[in-house]
Amino acid sequence: MTLASTVLHEETVVLASVSTPPGGYVPPSIEEFFYDPLFGSGIFAVNRIVLMMLLMTGVLCLVFGLGFRRAQVVPRGLQNVLETGTEFVRTQIADEVIGKEHGRRFAPYLTALFFFIFAMNITAVIPGLNLPVNGLAALPLILAVITWGIYNYQGAKSQGLGPYIKGSLFPPGIPTPIYLLVTPIELVSTFILRPVTLFIRLLANMIAGHLILGLFFSASTYLFLGYQDGRWWTAFFGLGSFLGAIVFTFFEVLVSALQAYIFTLLTAVYLAGSLEPEH
Amino acid sequence: MSAVTGLLLAVEGGEAKNPLIPNANELFWGTICFAVFAGFMIKYVLPTAKKALDERTAGIEGKLAQAERDRDEAQQLLAQYREQLAEARTEAGRIRTEAQAQRAQIVEEARGEARTEAGRITEAATAQIASERQQVVTELRREVGGLAVQLASRIVGESLEDEARQRRTVERFLEGLEDAPAGSATDPVAVR
């Protein structure tokens, strides 16, 4: 992040030193994330985002379908690669956080969640798509709500609805007066903030990543075109900006995987909390 | 490009858009997409993967168990072979001892037999020698008697028709012979 802010700062300085050329530099804005329908209307309307969702879902199903079409006892090629991923989610997230006993029940959902989020993040750096689908509110919201529904349902199912809510709102082992303070915090935290933070963390990370990439690339273009106004030397700064764009493209790949991992991990943590009453 | 259109839209629309508010169509399609993918994974992909994984685990466990069994069997066989080897060594030792005992016995028996045989042969030889000697003595006595008489009659020139006298003379002569040493005993014969 320090690297990002330094580079951003540098760019701002560069931009400030260059007096506004005709036409001016237009930085990418939040408008990047809104697209008009291509066809259809209402909730069936299909725009560029929906096309990307459908494409990535198709790719995911195709890859996993092909990889495990004839699952071999001795894995080869694609199956090997995919198994590394599914095994990672199963052992490092499900078994590790929830425990082996209940972990295997939730491993399929967690695996689907992880790969779905990753696929919808990685579109940020896929040439031609160049936009994280999770940079739009829809998918993060849906996934956060599903996770919220599942862990609350599991809590009510495994502990009973009453004990689950009581255990969540009145954690045992606290002096009675403190509940005046703790219970409102727990209420907001467990039932409201958890899904909201899941939603916003993923969404904001992907928006920020996309804006940074957009900034670097548009700035590079702008600076490289400085010669048209007789300022050929802006191209040197354009080179720095382009380098930054390349670095942050790799950074976005990392962020895509990391955010998918964090979302999945937190889902597992919340599930683990619901399965066992708090001590 | 899109930055420019975005700006134009913003300028024209005049209202700021909130990135936290999802679009209804994206919610709808997003739900379908996740449902399809999650369903596909949970119903088909992961069970298939799990089956392969379980088979792999079972296979490895089976091979390990088989290896364990093989090792146990090999150790059992080794122990058995060692036992048999020890048995064979004991047996060989026993046979050797027995053979030595038998050899000693055979040698002893042979020696005894040889001794008996030697004694028997010696005895037979002694008996034969004795009998032959007796025979020779008898023969010799008779011939020497005849010869002596003949010699005596020739020397003395007298007829010894008288049986009694003749016999006495001979007896006397023979007694003298027997009393004389071996060398002189032959003298009467050598005189002839």
Image: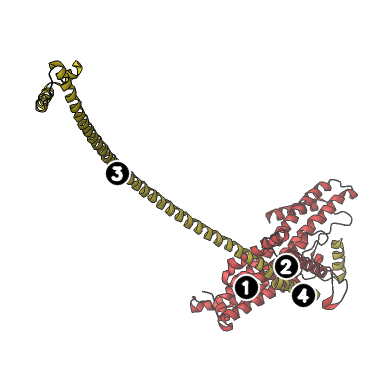
User: Residue A53: image x %, image y %?
Assistant: 79, 69
Estimate the spatial distance between the alpha carbons at disc 1 and disc 3, rounded to whole Å.
93 Å
Q: Position of residue B50 (x, y in %)?
A: 65, 68
Residue labelled with disc 2: A116
In this rendering, the answer to whether A169 lies above or below B112 is: below
Residue that mark 3 sits on: B109
**According to the image, label 4 marks what residue?**
B32
For mark 1, what is the residue? A105
The colour with which the image depicts chain B is yellow
Per the model, the C-alpha gap separating discs 4 and 3 is 112 Å
Badge 3: few (under 14), some or many (20 or more) residues near its Cα, within 10 Å?
A: few
Is any atom of residue B88 visible in this view? yes
Would you say B136 lies left or right of B17 here? Answer: left
Tag 1: residue type? Arg
Q: Nearer the viewer, residue A168 or A156?
A: A156
B83 on left or right of B147: right
Q: Secondary structure at mark 1?
A: helix
Color of chain A here?
red
Q: Nearer the viewer, mark 4 or mark 3?
A: 3
Q: Please tell me if label 3 and label 2 are on a single chain.
A: no
Q: Is residue A155 left or right of residue B36?
A: left
